[in-house]
Amino acid sequence: MPLLDVRDLSVVFQRKGTRPVTAVDGVSFTVEPGQTVGLVGESGCGKSVTSLAIMGLLPRRGNRVGGEVRFDGTDLLTLRPRDLRDRRGRDIGMIFQDPLSSLNPVIPLGLQVAEVLERHQGRSRQAALREARGLLDAVGIPDPARRLKEFPHQLSGGMRQRALIAIALACKPRLLIADEPTTALDVTIQAQILTLLKDLVDRSGTALMMITHDLGVVAGLCDTVNVLYAGKVVERAGRHDLFADPRHPYTHGLLQSVPRLDADRGGRLHQIRGSVSDNIPWPEGCAFAPRCDRVNDACIGETVPLAPTHRGGALRCTNPVPQEVSA
Amino acid sequence: MSGTGGIATLAEHKRRRIDELTARTAEAGGVSLLRDAGRRLLRNPTAVVGAVIILLFLVIAVFAPLVAPHDPVQRFPELTRDLTVDAIPGASAGHPLGSDPLGRDFASRMIYGARQTLFVGVLATLIGLLSGVLLGAVAGAAGGWVDVLIMRITDVLLALPSLLLAITLVALASRSTQWTVIIAVAVVNVPIFARLLRGAMLAQRESDHVLAARALGVKRRDIVLRHMLPNSLTAVIVQATLTFAVAILDAAALSFLGLGDPDINRAEWGLMLGVDGVRYFEVRPELAYFPALAIIAVALGFTLLGESMREALDPKNRR
Amino acid sequence: MVRVILRRLIQLVVTLLALMTLVFFWLRSLPGGPVDALLGERATPQTRELLTRALGYDQPIWVQYGRFLKNVVTGNFGNSIRTGEPVMDVISRSFPATVELAAGAIVIAIGLGLPLGYLAARHRGRLLDNATIIVTLVGISIPIFFLGYLLKDWLTQDIHFFPPSGRITTGLDNTDVTGFFVLDGLLTRELDASADALWHLVLPALTLATIPLAIIIRITRASVLDVLDEDYIRTADAKGLRNATIRRRHVLRNALLPVVTTIGLQTGALLAGAVLTEKVYNWGGLGTLITDSISGGRDYPVLQALILLAAAVFIVVNLLVDLSYAIIDPRVRVQ
């Protein structure tokens, strides 16, 4: 049984006086125990909202969530808030994009780590702080005893994100959700953090759901990759398959736009024309159609389903890139 | 628009697409902060209510002679006849709100009171605003010791709470007139506006468009007048509306304390409330209720408008 | 930290000095001068000359100023024109009454303001929030002396629930130790006096508390709303912490920062409100003293001292607020 089984998840935002916006439109994917799964897409494709919906962290009002999110068999969406709160932090951990704003500025770091242990494992303050020191050490923070008493603004960006990872993994959850954890960091630090994550996850057997717009991150880390566009999964494939042989025109375009060291220096950068907001205003048809070079009438008029592929993935396209075209 | 299979050709689809996108970009292009704010304000019920209240009283004030049944100063024999210390005549024919303690038509005094009260408020706010803005602009533009000096002065003035400062000023004046009250309340507001404008100017000084102007060689005076002041205006306008409410309340408080305008003939709500209203509260509470409610309504109107303007002009709220 | 305190104290002294100088020169510049103010109607050329010489007003202005400063530093503010007593005595007699009143008002304003502000923010957009906003808006638009009369009318005349005026029932035997009647009663174990004083305190404190209460509610609400939007609250949620923990440790600790500043400012502003409230309820504190010293002839010695006292109080309160900020917000502490 998969550890996380998302079935047909949908999130519709509705503020009074505006039209409803469907941010997530029938997204389905699974995460097996110990597996690393990527959720890839541009800004606005709904990947962050998906993760928030899974954790139950969307605002209480102004949105409607549909579908199922089965974690270890239990549908999280039907749980009472109190029960969901019990699971958060203990069974599922999450880290976010901006490490500075994600930490409480007026509370010492040690307490911010310890409080998770106090809450879910019933430890005393002293015991929790002692364990917190060990956790900070495990994520590579130097001189952890001193850091316990320091405040977030006294740490560097990389250290803060390490601390947040320590917090998320403190209770040894089965699943860790990472929402763009390196986007706000320097490139050199990014690499360190990703290595750290991979290391920790491999050693503890924690499943990892990595949300990012950066294909480079995905390439080094994820076993399976889901590509999102306009709130829908448009392609799913194993890491090697996806990068070697992308079928969906969007994925193909994304990979083509990555600058390459071995490309011809005088050549122009490839780009996908148009932008994410160039959508077809009616619900049927593929959302990517206005920007697609392979578009045909079938793409515009009818709903395109997500169909399984021969190589174990899935594809939502009526006219996919033929195999062996991409280099 | 249900397009199930309704689109015949790709070309038609592309044409429709482009038309839509062009329409959308034209609409979204370059909305200035003011226009955006204005639009948001008109939709905001608080702002509308506040504006309506203010307009209502403004109209009453301007057209007082037409609206009021009688002259506000004249004493009417039919009222003074029944006047005693313990009983002030109430509503009667021709005098819808009855009499005031001196036999004058209360309704007319209330209506003319709109004029006086708004006059006091407008003047106090205006004088305070102009002086404060001038001071703040000089401080912000000049910098250096001029700035420090002006800031120290405002610090001294701000050391006291507003009403106390007003009381102090009245106390330090040898006698009280209507103008004493106006000046006192105005002076209380000077440091507020000065600080406000100086802050806005300082923020502007470092902003990109000022740097660009300086790089282009625009004269400093022009920079101040043409670039920095207009952008600081919005904060000043918001503060002015809020100040207005406080000005009227402070003026009323001064009258209550016996420090206000000594002319008992003048029909001004603060005066009516603070002197007659409280003195005859047990005999005829209407003498207090009406001016009080009027003051509350006007103060509320300005506060509502000011608060919603502040929210509307806050760039964080931009869609 | 010590440096900050030192700097602020210097600022305090400088501001007071500036204020005193302003007042000093202003009084001297009035038509007729302070001598006329002192003599009032009884001024004749002879008496005027006598008094001028006696008080040293014929000395060069610098000498007068020097003497003035020396007097102030030694606490000698002269004698009240009205009562003839030393100014310090007059003031210290009225001081406790106003402090009691202000303390009562602050307790009400904070005790009700913080929870209401927080609740309004938590239930944003719903009935409690909207009702709170409307009530606070009216609260800051109402002249507080009018409110005082209203409360008096309803609660002391129509229903004889509270006493209408004064600090304590006349005739009630109470020993005056510190001047703080409620406290005195506890100290001398005359509990009935304490209770009586407290009873008298309720309405005036309530009246005085109105504006600070309204402002504290609004600032708390705004601040809590800001904090609720912050990312670290989302982190706390993601940790699965209990609501009470999040509220206490993450929301309130951060939301209270701007509220503390406001409380400080409002405390200073209480003196202004006290002037009005004391008149309505016949309270006999500094506020009453101020009005008495102005209407019916300006009692300049008393006024001088009062201005300085008010300014000093306000500045000291601001200093305390700044200090508390340093204690609460670790980001400020470093250096």
Image: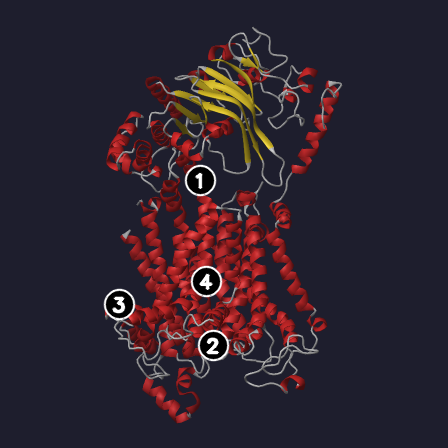
Q: CA distance from mark 4 to mark 2?
A: 30 Å
Q: Residues within 10 Å of mark 3 (few under 14, many from 20)?
A: some
Could you say where residue B264 lies in the image, as x and y percent from the top left?
57, 80
Residue at numbered disc 4:
C210
Disc 4 + disc 3, Cβ < 8 Å: no
Could you say where residue C315 lies in the image, as x and y percent from the top left?
36, 62
Q: Quadrant of residue A194?
A: top left
**Which amino acid is tagged 4?**
Thr
Whether residue B61 is visible: yes
Q: CA distance from mark 4 to mark 3?
A: 28 Å
Task: Tell me the residue at 52%/67% (across/down).
Answer: B249
Could you say where residue A92 lies in the image, as x and y percent from the top left?
40, 26
Q: Nearer the viewer, residue A242 or A234?
A: A234
**Which amino acid is tagged 1?**
Glu
Residue at numbered disc 2:
B173
Q: Earlier in the sequence, mark 3 or mark 1?
A: 3
Residue at numbered disc 1:
C230
Question: Which marked residue is nearer to the observer: mark 2 or mark 3?
Answer: 3
